[in-house]
Image (tube, rainbow, N blue to C red):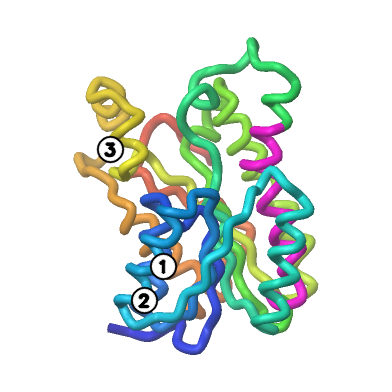
Amino acid sequence: MTQRFEGRVVVVTGAGGGLGRAFARGFAKEGASLVLTDVDAGLLEEAADEVRSLGATASTHLVDLFDEAAIKAFGAQVCAAHPAVHVLINNAGLAYGEISYAFAELSMDKWLRYFAINSVAPLILGQALRPALAKAKGVIINQSSMAAAVPGTAYGVTKATLNSMTYGMAGAFAADGVRVNAIAPGIMETPASKAALTDEQKARVSGMQMLNLHGTAEDIANLGLFLASDDARFIDCEIVHCDAGNRLRGWRG
C-alpha cells in the first residue's frame, strides 16, 4: 500500500461515527498521525483503538462544535503539539432526527445551533488551525451532502450554506497555500444511516441513482484521501459529488 501521508498530521472531526472512522482508518493505513475529535467519548476511544491497531498514533479530544471557545482551545492545543497540520477533515455534523425533515416550524435557537455546527464550525476550526495548516500548506475537506442540491430541510440548508462557506474558505486560505474542497456524499451505508432511515427511504434514494450500487463509508474516505494527497494539488474550491450519479442534484452546465 502507498504511504502518501507518512509523517503527516491529519485532524478528523466526528471520528467516532461511520464516515469519520473510515477517514481515520484510511489515513492511518497510509502512514498518518491522527488527531481525532468527537462528542461521544466511547465511540471516540473505539476509533482511536482501531487506528492504533493499524500501527498509527492517535490522540483523542472531546470537542463540542457548538462551543466556539472549545473549538479555539482545541485548535491552540493542536498547534502547540503539531506545528504543521497537513489535513483537516471537517466531518462532524448533525444529519438525522429533526434537522433531516423540519424547516418552517423550527425556532431561531434551533436554526442557529444547526448552522453553527454544520456550516460555521468548519471555518472556526480551520481558522484556529490556520498557523499549522499554513506551515504545511495543507488541505481542508468539508463534509457536505447531496441534500444541499434540494435545501428543503434544515439539513439541506446547512449543507448548501457549507458549500458556500467552502468557496469563501478556499479564497481566504489560498494566501497560505491551503486548499479547501468539499465532498457531497449520497446515502452511504453507515451505522447512523442504517438506524435512521427506513428501507423505503433508502430505496427511494437508490432509485434516483444512475448506478445500481450501494455506497459505503470507504467510498467517501477514498475520495478524501485523494483530495488530501499531492495527486490533487491543482484541485481547489470544488464540491465533489460521490453519490452514484444521483439525479436528485440535477444537471449543472
* C-alpha gap between disc 3 and disc 1: 36 Å
For the residues labelled 1 and 2, say whether their Cβ atoms are less than 8 Å apart. Answer: yes
Which three-letter amino acid code belongs to the residue tagged 1?
A: Ala
Which three-letter amino acid code belongs to the residue tagged 3?
A: Met
Residue 52 relative to residue 147: left or right: left
Q: Residue 57 placed where, x, y %?
A: 45, 80
Q: Residue 191 placed where, x, y %?
A: 31, 43
Which three-letter amino acid code belongs to the residue tagged 2?
A: Arg
Image mark for residue 104: none
Image mark for residue 48: 1
SS class of the residue under badge 1? helix
Image mark for residue 52: 2
Specify the principal SS of the magenta part. helix
Query: Residue lying furthest front in this view?
Result: 42
Q: Does the magenta portion include 127?
A: yes
Q: Which residues are magenta?
A: 113-133
The residue at the point 53 percent across, 54 percent down is 38
* C-alpha gap between disc 2 and disc 3: 38 Å
* C-alpha gap between disc 1 and disc 2: 6 Å
